[in-house]
Each structure stands twice: as structure tokens, then as C-alpha cells.
Image (tube, grey):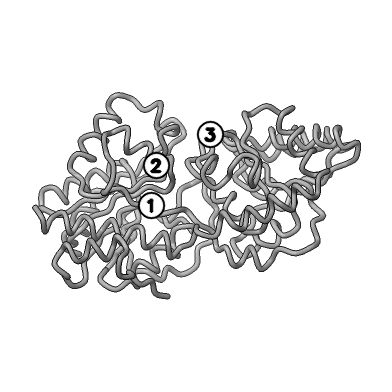
Amino acid sequence: MNVAIDPGTPAARGKEAAGGRGAVRVAMVTNIPAPYRLPMYELLAAAPGIELKVFFCSGREPDRQWDLQRLRVPHVFLRERVLTWRGRYIHANPDVWPHLRAFAPEVVVTTGFNPTHLIAFLFARLVGLRHVAMTDGTADSESRLSPLHRWLRRRVYRRSQAFIGASEGSFALYRQYGLGEPALYKSQLCADNRAFETAAGARRDVDLIFCGRFVAGKLPLFAIETAREVAVRLRRRVVLLLVGSGELEPAMREAAASAAVWVDACFAGFARQAELPAHYARSRLLLFPTVGDTWGVVANEACAAGVPVIASPQAGVAGDLVRDGENGRVLPLDVARWADAAAALLQDDATWQRMSRRCLELVRPYTYASAAEGVAAAVAHAVGARAAS
């Protein structure tokens, strides 16, 4: 795979500002090898002018069941030290320091504010390197941070040369800290659009699909309740496909059994990446209730398969990839409103077809190549900032 930095793009302009330097050594320090980011890393590593190494804090966090293929990007797995605090996983890997020293990067990119990220940032500061901050977070997802967390972000952002965000919500977050153009770059979260679009077919025998971990923050019980109310409005039994696994599965099976007169709930279990396109290909609507997803790659997958999405405003995709009335609905977490919207779409084929086509149009720019270009542009800007300083 390869991704070119085209003339005239921000990355190319940044490279010119840096004096047309050769390959820039870039250290990416991130939590875990998330499958929706790995293809972007591979493209970035293959980009002319970049020598990339990714430093992973851990191979996998305890609540993830991702199926990971062999990593095709230069990488290091740091010695795992994962702490749990109020349901969050905190990475503390002091060995990131000697690993960074051995790699000798010119630019350090950190994707969060775990102790490991802060150690990497401190290394960059003390050695005199450029630092690029990268986040999937949004102004909404970070609205309840403590004063200490906000202070840390201000300190890091004030000493960074470029900023990468996954969404418009990420840009809104950066602007709250007084950051703006031209130092903001977007690296979208993506799915393999072609795989989902190719799989989509005429057989849509599933009314509703829920895809994600079966945990409280994803609201799978809300999805089952919504499906029941949709069936009542349609006066027929609806098919609900539940893809995933997690601690709420026993409660979900109990709720599904109670609603069995109205809902044919099909538990598909945890699905590997290669299995997901076939699930979406069968489905008509994605239910994406959430109280805290900073983005929601499930929406990319659904849109690439031509499946309209009903999402809560708390989802990062809301108003960005998922636009109310265009390719789905963005609604408060109210079962009656969700059921009304879903029932209306399931009964109105013309509107469903229009939204399905709009899904394909809106998701098209969300590609791994574009995401890699965003990171490359931020790196070039950071190097150019040093050359100009």
C-alpha cells in the first residue's frame, strides 16, 4: 500500500516550509492496535518522506475482543502496565522513554493523556523534538473533565506544534483551548468502505441492527426496547440483529425473551472484521444509542453498506457523518421518538432509498488514505514550524 503527498496539499506545503527535508522519523504513541486505525498506520508508514514507528501501550485492553491480523507496520509493544480507575483503563509504561531514545524520532505524536503519553511528551520536550497532539475526543466527550485534566491539556497543547482530530467535534474541542487554523488537521476514523459497499445487496431481511459491545454505555437494552415499540407501531414482528458480546448479554437475552411476541432477536455473537459486511448487507436500519462514543465506526460501516443510522446526539458521528433527515436521524435517547422514527423509515421505501444513497455519498471521503494524509500533513506542519522557529 502507498499514499502519496500530492503537490498543493497541506502536507506538501509543510514539507516545502521545512526545506524539502528527507524522511522524517515519526514516533506514534497510542494505547492499543485498534483495527480501524491499523490500515491508516500502514499507509502512513508507506508514505514518501515519513519513517514511522508505532509504540503500543498494550496488545489489547480487557474489554476488547478485536481480531488482529499480523501488524504490517514497524511497531513496539511496551511492557504492559494497565491500571483500572472508575471503569477506565490507564496505561503507564515507563519503558516508552528508552524505546523513544533508541528510535530517535524527529516528531512525537501522542493520542491521549495517559501517563505513557505524558512521558512521551516530556521526552519530546526535553530532547527538543516536535510534538503533535492527536485525539478522537470531542468538546462534548470532554465537557466533564476535572480542573487537573484541563490544566494538563493546556500545558501540553501550548507546547505542541500541530493538532490532529478525528471529527468536527475534535476541532471544536481544540478551539476551546484557543487552538485553530492552520495547525488543525483531520484524520477521520474509517471502515473499509469498499468491503461494505460490495457486500450490500437486495436481501434486507433484518429490520434493525445493533452492533457493538454489550455494555451499559452502548445502551443495548435501549435498542431492544426500541425494537419492541417499532413492532407495536408496525403491528408486526420485527427482526433485530444483535452483533457483539459483553457483560449485559444475560440481561439482553432476558429482555429479548420478554419481547419475543414482538421482536425476533437474533444474537450473532462477536463478529470478526471480515464477517461484519454480511451483517450490514442484510439490515435496513442501524440503531446507535450511546452515552459516550467519541465517534462510532459502526456508523461508517452502516453508511458504507447503505444502511441509514439512528444515533443519539452524544455520538461523535452525530451532525458529522450522520446528519438528521439526510442519511438518518439524530434523536435524544427517548424510546418513543426512536420508535416513531424507525417505524416511519421502515414503512417509507422512497425515503429509505434516498437516505441509503445519501449514506454512500457522505461516507465516501472517510477513507484510510485520507486519514493518513491528515497525519502526514500535521507532521509536515510541525517540522515546518521548527524550521521557521
Verify CB contact (< 8 Å) between mark 3 and mark 2: no
Mark 1 and mark 2: Cα distance apart in space: 9 Å
Work out whether residue 247 can be spotted.
no
Q: Which residue is mark 2?
A: 170
Along the line of sight, which residue is nearer the eye, 378 or 133?
A: 378
Q: Amino acid at mark 2?
A: Ser
Label 1 crowd (10 A; few <14 / some 14-19 / many >=20): many
Q: Look at the image and tell me in which quarter the N terminus lies.
A: bottom left
Q: Residue at x 63, y 45 (%)?
A: 326
Q: Earlier in the sequence, mark 3 or mark 1?
A: 1
**Would residue 150 appear left or right of 296 to someone viewing this image?**
left
Q: Which residue is mark 3?
A: 314
Mark 3 and mark 1: Cα distance apart in space: 20 Å
**Would residue 196 appear left or right of 190 to someone viewing this image?**
right
Q: Position of residue 154 (x, y in %)?
A: 24, 34
Q: Position of residue 113 (x, y in %)?
A: 31, 41
